[in-house]
């Protein structure tokens, strides 16, 4: 998570639009730890949230929050003789006035209904669980010989790699690609990768409502076994 306070200050000083991409992690604001990590997000002019990630809802449920709605109307608003006027109704949002879409489904219902049925507390507890699981996984990875934690988890993602002091980056990339393939080949967990600063890294990202402690334990054991296989 970037330093949102510093970015907000720069944006304010330079009269820039401050947009925050909180698609993956924004809903962790429901937790105390998430609020600490994302301090400064409240100064954003706009932000993106994906309930299909942070709130475990169906894919394709995304949201943009904008501080000043008139900016959207200036960018997207349009009129035509064949388009009915709906914006005169104070409680009705005419989405063709604030987005490129003229026709669209009621996506907000996917978000409103689960919260109405289960309450925000249910989602807060689930998100806190994912933070706990990620912290546990990170501590368990540290106990595996030759595993290097490259990016400590701020939310529910941790990046690591298998480290061999006598290997160059090219060899380490090959080694970690093989490690990732061995982990995913078991078809019990699915880890992803990224490359940053020329380093190939493996990532655990816990953001499924079906992922609980037993699966994270199994994940770490699979990693441990795969590392041992590569020693042979």
Image (tube, rainbow, N blue to C red):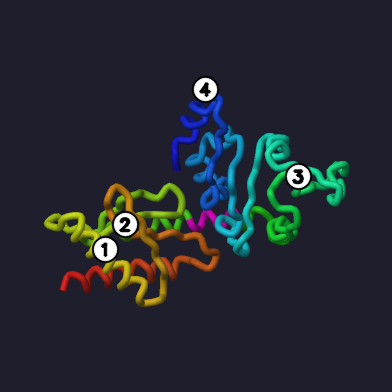
Q: Which residue is drawn at 43% across and 47% down?
A: 154
Query: Distance between the Cα atoms at labels 1 and 4?
Result: 43 Å
Q: The residue tagged with tag 4: helix, strand or loop?
A: helix
Judging by the rendered image, the residue that carries numbered circle 1 is 176
Magenta region, residue range: 124-130
Label 3: how many Cα within 10 Å (few below 14, some 14–19, many 20+) = many
Judging by the rendered image, the residue that carries numbered circle 4 is 13
Residue with the most extreme bottom position: 186
What label sits on residue 201 in the rendered view? 2
Judging by the rendered image, the residue that carries numbered circle 3 is 97
Residue with the most extreme left position: 166
Q: Residue at x 68, y 39 (%)?
A: 75
Q: The residue tagged with tag 2: helix, strand or loop?
A: strand
- Can you tell which of label 1 and label 4 is closer to the viewer? 4
**Main secondary structure found in the magenta portion:** helix
Circles 1, 4 touching at the beta carbon (< 8 Å): no
Mark 2 or mark 1: whose residue is earlier in sequence: 1
Q: Where is residue 211 in the image (x, y as percent from the top left)?
A: 49, 66
């Amino acid at each position: 998570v970037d330093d949102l306070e510093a970015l907000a200050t720069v944006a304010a000083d330079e009269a820039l639009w401050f947009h925050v991409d909180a698609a993956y992690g924004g809903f962790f604001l429901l937790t105390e730890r998430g609020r600490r990590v994302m301090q400064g997000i409240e100064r954003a002019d706009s932000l993106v949230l994906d309930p299909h990630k942070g709130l475990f809802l169906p894919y394709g449920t995304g949201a943009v929050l904008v501080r000043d709605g008139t900016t959207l109307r200036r960018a997207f608003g349009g009129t035509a003789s064949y388009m009915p006027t709906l914006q005169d109704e104070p409680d009705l949002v005419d989405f063709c006035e604030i987005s490129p879409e003229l026709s669209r489904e009621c996506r907000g219902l996917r978000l409103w209904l689960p919260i109405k049925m289960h309450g925000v507390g249910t989602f807060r507890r689930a998100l806190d669980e994912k933070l706990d699981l990620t912290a546990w996984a990170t501590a368990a990875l540290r106990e595996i010989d030759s595993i290097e934690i490259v990016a400590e988890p701020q939310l529910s993602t941790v990046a690591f790699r298998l480290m061999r002091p006598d290997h160059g980056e090219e060899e380490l990339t090959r080694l970690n690609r093989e490690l990732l393939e061995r982990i995913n080949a078991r078809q019990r967990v699915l880890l992803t990768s990224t490359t940053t600063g020329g380093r190939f890294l493996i990532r655990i990202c816990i953001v499924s409502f079906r992922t609980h402690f037993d699966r994270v334990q199994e994940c770490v054991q699979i990693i441990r076994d795969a590392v041992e296989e590569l020693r042979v």
